[in-house]
Amino acid sequence: MKKALVKSLLLGLAGTFMASAALACSPIGAGRNATVDGSVITSHTCDGWYDNRIQIIPGQTFEDGATTPVYQDVCHGTQPTRPLKKVLDIPQVEKTYTYFHIGYPFMNEHQLVFGEDTWSGRDELYAKDGAFWIETLEIFGLQRAKTAREAIKVMGELAEKYGYGDGGETLIIADTKELWVFDICGPGMLWNKDSGKPGAIWAARRVPDEHVVVCSNRSRIGVIDFEDKDNFMYSSNVTDLAKEMGWWKSGTPFNFSEAYNPNPYGSDHYQSIREWRAFSLLAPSKNFELTSQKSHYPFSVKPDKKVAVKDIMAVFRDHLEGTDYDLTKGMAAGPFGNPHRWPTPKDVRPEGKKDKDWPRAISMFRCSYSFVSQSREWLPDPVGGVLWFGQDSPDTTVYVPLYCGVTKVPAGWSEGKRHEFDPNSAWWAFNFINNWAQLRWDSMIKDVNAEQQKWEKEFFMQQNAVEKEAVDLYKKDPKKAVAYLTDYTYGNMEKVQNAMWGLAWKLVGKYYDGYVMTPEGKQQSVGYPTWWLEAVGFGEDFKD
């Protein structure tokens, strides 16, 4: 088929198919020389209705000839209207590793951790016959790999062989030594399993050890250096479709992001403001300016000071406070500085602004869960891999340490419904608090912050002693170390779940009917700020 005809067909079909897209996620990673203790860090805010239940899937051994199923819609396990869809069976490997399953599977027993975000990309890339979506690639990557390089190879080969049918995606992948960014998209609408061509286009780039990287729903790979095999990996067809479609000219630098994701989705700054804010907080001396969606920041930067887990948590909880774009200020924030903006359907948006949307920060009310992980080469795997996990929105969650060696978590963190209120669910405790706090954000967030700081301070203070004890036990008997960390993690999760329900009812009793109840039982009337009363015309007579 002539190239011109191929291009014409792809362009004609582009509007016919739509790949799945996450509503918005913001992973951040830090190399081992960019962190305070030598950890390799990755992270994720999973924004949207995704499965928040932590399932621990044990590793197994298999006989020759065994097969394993491949499913689609794996990440929507708490949505009853989106059941799993089995698409095929593939050969199973001899041995799989234990991994942690959730909306976007995130960790295995060897300290391999994935953070994720969606960029969708050009419509012409979508391959309807592609078997794999990003979350299923993550499953097999975590089950079959110990390192980031191995995982990239596993996922790339599976996607090329069986096809990739999801929208463009990014993973920030951490192991005990390295940090990589992995971008993948479909091979085009004309691909099918009998075509004999690779079923995916992908590339991966290593983050320098002394750098941090930020991704937010647009491809971040940038220009591929095909001579640098140590720091780049890619599919054999990485330039083919771009050349065929005229998205790239042979002989010029090949920018993966510009070829396959030239027009990031969302209104202008939807992605770039999150990248700008994270880089500004971690490397303020760079004085980055906010750019449009079509302009790019450096792939990665060296932070002004070495980064701790708590620093990434703070970035995740940010609402652009103190900037010109502060979401806690102005009429849209209401009288009480609420940084959250509800989804606004296009049919109710003002004329001339149908393609616009609210500005957004990294922290989002609709987040299902978030985490910040540490992978540490100097510790045994069950101890060295720890993922600080928070249910629901980052700004009102409590991050609890989850070690990669644990064998169980409480039912409140591994079970539950999202379409019905569930008082036995940890997620519902955090979600209730976030929703109630929006009635009087400026006051209630102080109560929430105090509870967060209490628990997280305790966990950070205990970390060294807990891990020392676990290492000592590991030297005697690894199973005892695993049992110790399992009990520690399980107990913390139960305590935090109970504490957050306690906080929820405390907020209900303290803030209601526009009043604030004091500990002594006095009801205080706090009213509204003067600037807001003036803005809404308080005291003006009704007009005829």
Image (cartoon, rainbow, N blue to C red):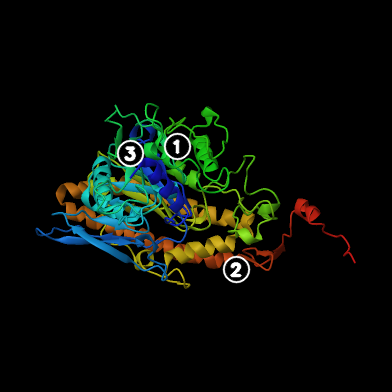
Structural crowding at the residue carrying mark 1, measured as other residues with C-alpha within 10 Å and reported as few (<14), some (14–19) or many (≥20): many
Instruction: Look at label 3 and name its amino acid.
Output: Val
Q: CA distance from mark 3 to mark 2?
A: 58 Å
Instruction: Locate the C terminus and report the quarter of the image it occupies.
Output: bottom right
Secondary structure under tag 3 reads loop
Instruction: Look at label 1 and name its amino acid.
Output: Glu
Structural crowding at the residue carrying mark 2, measured as other residues with C-alpha within 10 Å and reported as few (<14), some (14–19) or many (≥20): few
Structural crowding at the residue carrying mark 3, measured as other residues with C-alpha within 10 Å and reported as few (<14), some (14–19) or many (≥20): some
Q: Is residue 120 visible?
A: no
Q: Are marks 3 and 2 in contact (CB under 8 Å)?
A: no
Measured from the top left, where is residue 188 in percent x and y?
A: 37, 48
Measured from the top left, where is residue 440 in percent x and y?
A: 64, 59
**Horizontal arrangement in the rendering, residue 513 relative to residue 392 (left or right):** right
Residue under numbered circle 3? 238
Q: Quadrant of residue 213?
A: top left
Rendered position, 162 above or below 312: below
Q: Earlier in the sequence, mark 1 or mark 3?
A: 3
Residue under numbered circle 1? 258
Say which residue appears at 46% left-offset and 63% top-offset: 499
Measured from the top left, where is residue 535 in percent x and y?
A: 78, 53
Residue under numbered circle 2? 509
Rendered position, 465 above or below 500: above
Q: Are marks 2 and 1 in contact (CB under 8 Å)?
A: no
Q: Earlier in the sequence, mark 2 or mark 1?
A: 1
